[in-house]
Image (tube, rainbow, N blue to C red):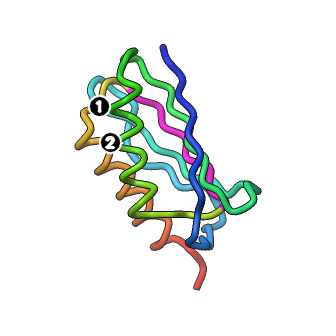
Amino acid sequence: METLDYRFDGHTAVHFPPQAVLVGVLASGNLEVLLEAAPLDGAMQVRIVTAASGFGSIWQAVIADFAARHPLRDVQVSINDAGATPAVVSLRLDQAVQALHEGAPQ
């Protein structure tokens, strides 16, 4: 198991639904993504726990791309990975942001 932590400046304020957002299923070749509100002085923090060690540079590229597309403020992103491909990671992250916007109070 490997744990990777990243922090990015956020620009987009988020209105969270009453509960945190969880997408995906932690199973072979997949992952789950949890988005939670957190007091991070406008930053987005990402923690990845993965069964596949040695892929830090790939994770950094995928997460940096996500942060550039979705610069969320005061959001903790937790990823539990069971060997998902970068495409699946991006899909799940986008799915989590969509669920966040759909479930946010208006």
Q: What residue is at 36 percent from the left and 52 percent from the top?
A: 65
- Could you say whether the residue bearing mark 1 is in a helix, strand or loop? loop
Q: Three-letter amino acid code at disc 2?
A: Val
Residue labelled with disc 1: 84
Q: Could you tell me what secondary structure mostly forms the magenta stretch?
A: strand
Mark 1 or mark 2, which has the lower sequence index?
1
Residue 42: name its quadrant. Answer: bottom right
Q: What residue is at 46 percent from the left and 44 percent from the top?
A: 33
User: Which stretch is magenta?
Assistant: 74-81
Q: Position of residue 29 (x, y in %)?
A: 26, 27
Q: Residue furthest bottom?
A: 106
Q: CA distance from mark 1 to mark 2?
A: 6 Å
- Residue 76 inside the magenta-drawn segment: yes
> What mark, if any, has residue 45 been given in the picture?
none
Q: Residues within 10 Å of mark 2 (few under 14, many from 20)?
A: many
Q: What residue is at 47 percent from the left and 31 percent from the top?
A: 80
- Could you say whether the residue bearing mark 2 is in a helix, strand or loop? helix
| Left or right: 101, with 82 as reference point | right
Q: What residue is at 42 percent from the left and 45 percent from the top?
A: 63
Residue labelled with disc 2: 89
Q: Is residue 18 above or below residue 57?
A: below
Total numbered labels = 2
| Left or right: 1, with 5 as reference point | left
Circles 1 and 2, Cβ within 8 Å, touching? The answer is yes
Q: Position of residue 40 (x, y in %)?
A: 73, 54
Q: Three-letter amino acid code at disc 1?
A: Ala
Closer to the camera in the image, 86 or 102: 86
* Quadrant holding the C terminus: bottom right
Q: Position of residue 6 (x, y in %)?
A: 56, 39
Closer to the camera in the image, 6 or 35: 6
| Left or right: 6, with 29 as reference point | right
